[in-house]
Image: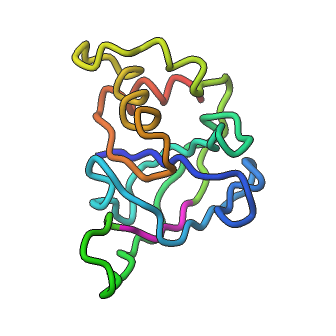
């Protein structure tokens, strides 16, 4: 399974330089199978447009994946994972919210729709699991 992460472009979230060789994300929210991320998995990095980023910026390999401990004071909480990623490629063309927002037919099976649904229907930053078809689609941007 492949994964994608949408994160802030601030120092706090670590995508300050899309050309960096490594990225470290601490206790990131996971949805849509994102908590299954493991060392060796392919991951696509999106710099959150809500935070001044430009969307898809890099592809990488997960070099470390560690579940964040649950907080005992919270009854309901979204699973969180800390990951370290080694960049393997930088994007050659743009893909972000503007390009994906027209794909709204949630049942059409298109990779663009999967990304729009998982990333932008609820616009929080997160790690998501993506289908093989969507991973192949994203590979076309490198």
Magenta residues, start to end: 80-85
Left of 38 or right of it: where is 13? right
Q: Is residue 27 magenta?
A: no
Residue at x 34%, y 59% (from the top left corner):
37
Q: Position of residue 115 (x, y in %)?
A: 41, 30
Between 15 and 89, the one nearer to me in the picture: 15
Between 30 and 1, the one nearer to me in the picture: 30
Residue 105 higher or lower than 52, as above or below: above
- The mark tally for this picture is 0
Residue at x 37%, y 47% (from the top left corner):
128
Q: Position of residue 55 (x, y in %)?
A: 62, 34
Residue 112 higher or lower than 49, as above or below: above
Q: Quadrant of the C terminus?
A: top right
Residue at x 53%, y 46% (from the top left corner):
6
Q: Position of residue 122 (x, y in %)?
A: 42, 39
The main secondary structure of the magenta stretch is strand
Between 99 and 92, the one nearer to me in the picture: 99
Left of 108 or right of it: where is 44? right
Q: Position of residue 38 (x, y in %)?
A: 34, 64
Left of 16 or right of it: where is 50? left
Residue at x 42%, y 52% (from the top left corner):
127
Task: Identify the image quadrant of residue 41.
Answer: bottom left
Task: Identify the image quadrant of residue 81.
Answer: bottom left
């Amino acid at each position: 399974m492949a994964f994608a992460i949408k994160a802030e472009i601030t120092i706090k979230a670590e995508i300050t330089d899309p050309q960096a060789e490594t990225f470290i994300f601490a206790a990131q929210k996971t949805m849509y199978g994102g908590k299954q991320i493991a060392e060796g998995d392919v991951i696509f990095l999106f710099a959150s447009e809500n935070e001044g980023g430009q969307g898809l910026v890099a592809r990488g390999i997960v070099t470390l994946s560690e579940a964040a401990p649950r907080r005992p004071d919270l009854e309901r909480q979204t699973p969180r994972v800390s990951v370290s990623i080694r960049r393997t490629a930088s994007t050659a063309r743009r893909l972000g919210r503007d390009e994906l927002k027209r794909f709204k037919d949630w049942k059409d099976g298109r990779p663009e729709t999967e990304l729009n649904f998982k990333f932008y229907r609820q616009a929080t930053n997160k790690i998501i699991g993506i289908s093989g078809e969507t991973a192949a689609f994203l590979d076309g941007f490198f």
